[in-house]
Amino acid sequence: MADLPIIRAGDALTPAEVYAIWKIRDAVFAVEQQCDEPDVDGIDLLPTCTHLWYADEAGPTSYLRTYVTDAGVRKVGRVATRSDSRGQGLSSRLLREVLDRWGDAEIRLGAQAYLHDWYAGFGFERCGENFLEAGIDHVPMRRAPGA
């Protein structure tokens, strides 16, 4: 596995990359977590969406996306690591890459509630009440610019 993640803007993804990204997200969110909402939401192919992932010969091992909302706020989401690649710090490395690139601005995310403390370790703080998304308890979190 390479030390640097693969990074692509949504409008630069190849069809094979789109397929690989949706494959890892399907395995983690639809199959493992049994999410009850569609994954495809119209954001992935936008030029304001950036995809970051590590991969091996079987495809992406860990993945996340970040994008800028219509209101100009950067969000992080769809953080997923393949079950056979967990425990290697891959998601931490991807999130650190996001913070290195865009950490001088506010970043928001909806953390699965059990991951609150993990995101807090990167400087994210709760910024509202818990909410259900895809049938899973989430916590709204934000990271102040430069935190």
Image (cartoon, rainbow, N blue to C red):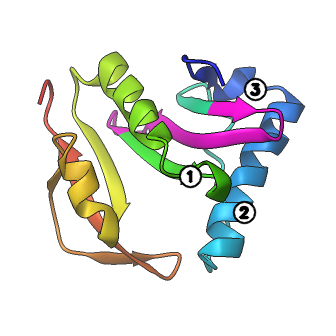
Distance (Cα) linking label 2 and label 1: 9 Å
The answer to whether residue 7 is left or right of residue 137 is right
Q: Is residue 129 above or below residue 3?
A: below
Q: Circle 3 — which element?
A: loop
Q: Which numbered disc flags the more N-terminal residue, 2 or 1? A: 2
Q: Nearer the viewer, mark 3 or mark 1?
A: 1
Amino acid at pointer 3: Leu
Few, some or many residues within 10 Å of mark 3 (<14, 14–19, 20+): some
Magenta-highlighted stretch: main secondary structure? Answer: strand
Distance (Cα) linking label 3 and label 1: 18 Å
> Count the marks: how many?
3
The answer to whether residue 125 is left or right of residue 21 is left
Residue 22: x and y, percent? 75, 50
Do the numbered discs 3 and 2 sit on residues whose CB atoms are within 8 Å? Answer: no
Amino acid at pointer 2: Ala
Few, some or many residues within 10 Å of mark 2 (<14, 14–19, 20+): some
Which residue in the protein does label 1 denote?
80
Q: Circle 2 — which element?
A: helix
Q: Nearer the viewer, mark 3 or mark 2?
A: 2
Which residue in the protein does label 2 denote?
27
Q: Is residue 88 above or below residue 100?
A: below
Do the numbered discs 2 and 1 sit on residues whose CB atoms are within 8 Å? Answer: yes
Residue 34: x and y, percent? 64, 79
Residue 40 shows up from this direction: no
Residue 59: x and y, percent? 78, 39
Q: Which mark is residue 13?
A: 3
Q: Which residues are magenta?
A: 54-74
